[in-house]
Image (cartoon, helix red, strand yellow):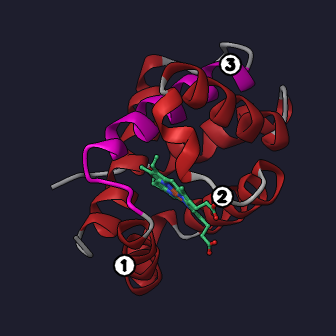
Amino acid sequence: MNTINPELVESCWSKVKHNQGEDAYSIIFYKSMFEQNPNIKPLFSSDIETQRIKLLNTLNLVINSIRHLEELKESLLELGKLHKEIGVNASMYDIVISNAVTALKVASNNTTTQEEEKAWEQAFRAISDMMLEAY
Ligand code: HEM
């Protein structure tokens, strides 16, 4: 079972907001993901500006609900279904999780601790696990 430390997840997001900000977080996230995995880019049909705003909305929703994530189970399952339909395969989730941590370090100006990075990774793992239940 994946146990998330809510305080550490919140402190990560707060460090992002007080350093480069959440817009920078999402820009870094896609930039590093596409640089390292050019094969993924063609899956994205809408413009990245729209996409990164959707990602940020979901991320904020998840962080606000981090103490009772099961309440988001239905919507994350729907999100998982959508991803399956557009051709995102299960192995791609590891790429997203790893990029989520990279973007965290950069957008917080490397102020996050290893424990915080671990908590961030676990939060993304928990979200991914809920989405993957649709597969
Ligand atoms: C933690 C896991 C993930 C989260 C929170 C997430 C979040 C989202 C959100 C909120 C959307 C917008 C859905 C909508 O239009 O209503 C989206 C779309 C999308 N996601 Fe993800 N995603 C995740 C994993 C992945 C993975 C592993 C991939 C594969 C590389 C991926 C690729 C895409 C693509 C291609 C779209 C559609 C973009 C378009 O409209 O062109 N996502 N994602």
Indicate if the residue with disc 2 has its beta carbon within 8 Å of ligand 1. yes
Q: Earlier in the sequence, mark 1 or mark 2?
A: 2
Residue with the mark numbered 2: 45
Whether residue 20 sits left or right of residue 129 in the image: it is: right
Q: Amino acid at mark 3?
A: Val
Residue 63 appears in which quarter of the rendering? Answer: bottom right
Q: Quadrant of ligand 1?
A: bottom right
* Residue drawn at point x = 43 percent, y = 75 percent: 76
Q: Nearer the viewer, residue 8 or 87?
A: 87
Q: Is residue 109 magenta?
A: no
**Disc 3 to disc 2, how far (Cα)?**
26 Å
**Given the image, on which type of amino acid does mark 1 rest?**
Leu
Given this view, does label 1 or label 2 mark the residue nearer the observer? 2
Residue at image mark 3: 106
Q: Which mark is residue 15?
A: none
Which type of secondary structure does the marked residue at label 2 adopt? Answer: loop
Label 1 packing within 10 angstroms: few (<14), some (14-19), many (20+): many
Q: Is residue 100 magenta?
A: yes
Q: For mark 1, what is the residue?
A: 77
> Could you tell me what secondary structure mostly forms the magenta stretch?
helix
Of the image marks 3 and 2, the number of the one nearer the N terminus: 2
Task: Say which quadrant the N terminus sits in.
Answer: bottom left
The amino acid type found where label 2 is placed reads: Ser
